[in-house]
Image (cartoon, helix red, strand yellow):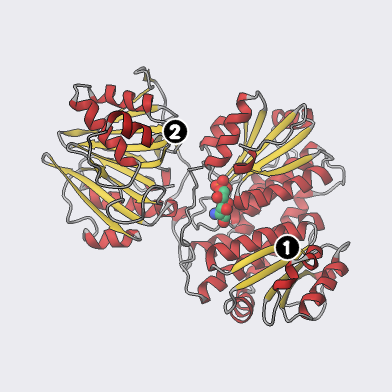
Amino acid sequence: MCGIVGYIGPREAAPILLDGLSKLEYRGYDSAGLAIYNDGVITVERAVGKLVNLYEKTDGGNKLKGTLGIGHTRWATHGKPNEVNAHPHSSENFSLVHNGIIENEAELRRTYLRDVEFASDTDTEVVVRLLEKFTSEGEEMDVAIMHLIDIIEGSYALAIIDRRDPDHMYAVKNKSPLLVGKGEGFNMIGSDAMAMIAHTDTFYEIQDKEFAIVTRDSVELYTSYSKRIDREPYKAELDLSDISKGTYPHYMLKEIEEQPLVIRRIIGEYQNEAGELTVPEEILADVRDCDKIYIIACGTSYHAGIIGKHFFENIAGKPAESCVASEFVYNTPLLTEKPLFIFISQSGETADSRAVLVKIKEMGYKSITLTNVKGSTLSREADHTLLLYAGPEIAVASTKAYTAQIAVLAILAASVKNRIGIDLKYELALIANTIEGLCGDRELYNRLAEEYIAPSRNCFYIGRGVDYYVCLEAALKLKEISYVQTEGFAAGELKHGTIALIEDGTPVVAVITQSNTNLNTRSNVKEVISRGAKVIRISSKSLSTRKDQIVIGDVHEMLSPLVSVVPAQYLAYYTALHRGCDIDKPRNLAKSVTVE
Ligand code: AGP
């Protein structure tokens, strides 16, 4: 979940690395560090907390002279987030940065490094110490790297420099993402393209257990058994403006308000020549051929998956189940005879989901990945990919990727079989307009968040059917960025125990967009009001009453999550704002969760 950048070229490395790290801070932000080579010496600077602390400590990088270096933002897995544990980690000759987890670090320490005194509590230091040991015993650098690949178990993206070598940097990868950026007279290493896009749009993919030897003018890729790989670089379709906040105070607000554009882009991308929304025939064939769809995802993507299950069963008549990846991988349910797996992941790098993909591939089952990131691990390793076209999502709290996931799932389900005759193109266009309308009501959400939710320690979202599924996502959004303890609850289930938590002033947000459960949910609202709750109602226009504070335009009931989630995203945003939270980088979280 950490972020890595490396640079070798003619320019001062430190400012370039700091700029690259600022694009990766979403991956982790409890500490950061740089290692810069200059004239036979590697200088390391590290700072606890946000990148700005390292920036200040190094005067924007100007204090560190040298044209070769590596940098890192950390999300702690081993050892406290302090300066000693911050990367880069160094031995006598090497400095390296690492993203991932070395699973057999204890065994490696016992087997190879008994006499070594470690400076930190990290698993990463084991790697740099091993490299020092192997090279000091006479192994050439490439041999020592292959030796590492051979004995290390776990996930790693590594960038390495050597104080005796001004002309090389090394990249090694297994399970954690890493790219090499190809420049003219310079080259870079980065956890993702965004860290390098200001300098180059051309990248080499590094696959698992491969390594790269990078100089100012060349990039050589090798397998773990020393075979040179002949791989063409690819061009990333990323624009610097896509990753800037523009005039918005936070990425999250920008991304919420990009949702109409994203839905319209999806309509454009999934349209065939006849103007119908569909997906490639080979994907449809695999979906039609299966006897059950298993949707695998985490967090927000899992919440989109639950709605996907609803679509597959109700639009396409296909049995489906949505599963939390980290549970599924070690507690796999009894599978049907011909299962098909759909992975949903904004980043395409989530380790929990990938563990399932590896497992089901070994079992010989087919897979489709829905992702926002072309060329990501889950995309490369699945049989098929459907892209989300949401554009880079920077805020840790996922917003536009969630709605994009739901829209693409609806298109996939309706392309398989449209049993209910839904005119998806029309409905999605209407939804884009309806969300645009909701974006005009910022002040209302701001006021409700300030008055109802921000002062409270806890909060409930209640709803039934797809409204309940939206409540799960709405609750996650609120808790992850405002730290208000929130539960998304099936409205009818509340009275079976949890209603005991309702007291004077407890905020309850009810989502009411389904005509078949409208009155039932309203009864549940009365139950909580009579126990002191302060209720915000989000309802669709045709079901609304005068007391409902947030009324959303009518859309097809099955697709209402695409719209009803938007006020909930705003409520989370404004609650976090009133509570003084760091909205785009909430505590303890990282955008891309690349450890299990
Ligand atoms: C949502 O706001 C969170 N950032 C988190 O739950 C996220 O959805 C989850 O980690 C899965 O990530 P992915 O979609 O990139 O796989």
Q: Residue furthest left?
A: 39
Q: Amino acid at mark 2?
A: Tyr
Instruction: Report the number of numbered marks.
Output: 2
Q: Is any part of residue 496 visible from this angle?
A: yes
Which image quarter: residue 437?
bottom right
Q: CA distance from mark 2 to mark 1?
A: 45 Å
Mark 2 Cα shell of 10 Å, populated few (<14), some (14-19), many (≥20): some
Q: Is residue 501 above or below residue 139?
A: below
- Which residue is at the front of the view, 3 or 118? 118
Which image quarter: residue 338?
top right
Check contact, mark 2 vs mark 1: CB within 8 A.
Answer: no
**Where is residue 449 shown, x and y percent of the image?**
61, 76
- Which residue is at the front of the view, 60 or 501? 501
Q: Amino acid at mark 1?
A: Phe
Q: For the residues carrying marks 2 and 1, which lies nearer the camera in this image? A: 1
Which residue, given by chain and number where applicable, does mark 1 sit on? Answer: 489
Numbered tag placed on residue 234 in the rendering: 2
